[in-house]
Image: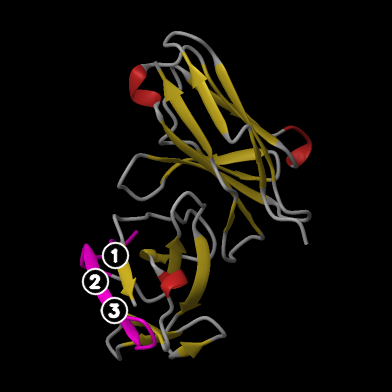
Amino acid sequence: EAGVVQSPRYKIIEKKQPVAFWCNPISGHNTLYWYLQNLGQGPELLIRYENEEAVDDSQLPKDRFSAERLKGVDSTLKIQPAELGDSAVYLCASSLVGTEQFFGPGTRLTVL
Amino acid sequence: DAKTTQPPSMDCAEGRAANLPCNHSTISGNEYVYWYRQIHSQGPQYIIHGLKNNETNEMASLIITEDRKSSTLILPHATLRDTAVYYCIVRLHTGGFKTIFGAGTRLFVKA
């Protein structure tokens, strides 16, 4: 069974540039999560989808971050414009409702 | 959602049992205890979860105290590959649950 796929694995951009991350969840998983992880800290939830609906986006900085999950499968997380403080690992996870989450390898973003 | 308290780091000798504690004194009656681990440069990996009873799977055992205010994750025979950050989380299964990761416990397994 294929796991959660994320791309790219690494991204280096200059500040004020846009950036997008892509996530393909495990087949059949209706719940998808985006997390941000700073160095030495645990993941922090940015947004949670159940199918196409964002059911928890309270921690998503909506002035510069956006996300979408068209057709309830793949998801894209975008930052525009990126700031130096956005440098972190962005993790995607998926699950069936009420079960354990399966995480992808993450995208490491460096903003210069 | 309840928060958890874990020691920042622990050491364990290879082949010995690793016992990782977690305090969750404000856990509510319908919140589960979950454990994940994160090996360097990888995403977190699910280990085990439980509500009231002790649980065991191929990876670990979870011991939950009778009052549910604390739990212990046991890796029965730690190997070098078990060196990772271990996260204890409490959460609901449905509804408006949040999965809140703390800083976790960094476990070093030494040869």
Instruction: Indicate the quadrant where residue A69 lies.
Output: top right
Give the alpha-carbon distance from disc 2 to disc 3, as whole Å.
Answer: 7 Å
Q: Do the residues bearing badges 2 and 3 touch, measured as CB atoms within 8 Å?
A: yes
Q: Name the residue that disc number 3 marks.
A: B12
**Side of A106 where B88 appears, left or right:** left
Mark 1 against mark 2, which lies toward the viewer? 2
Mark 3 against mark 1, which lies toward the viewer? 3
Counting residues from the start of the chain, the first of labels 3 and 1 encountered is 3
Colouring method of the image: secondary structure
Nearer the observer, B16 or A17: B16
**Side of A104 where B16 appears, left or right:** left
Span shown in magenta: B1-26
Quadrant including the N terminus of chain B = bottom left
Give the alpha-carbon distance from disc 1 to disc 2, as whole Å.
Answer: 7 Å
Mark 2 against mark 3, which lies toward the viewer? 3
Q: Position of residue B22 (x, y in %)?
A: 27, 73
The amino acid sitting under disc 2 is Met
Asked if the magenta segment contains residue A57, the reply would be: no
Quadrant including the C terminus of chain B = bottom left
The amino acid sitting under disc 1 is Thr
In the figure, A72 relative to A42: above or below? above
**Residue drawn 42% across the image and 11% down it:** A15
Q: Position of residue B71 (x, y in %)?
A: 31, 81
Which label belongs to residue B10?
Answer: 2
In the figure, B73 relative to A83: above or below? below
Q: Do the residues bearing badges 3 and 1 touch, measured as CB atoms within 8 Å?
A: no
Which label belongs to residue B105?
Answer: 1
Counting residues from the start of the chain, the first of labels 1 and 2 encountered is 2
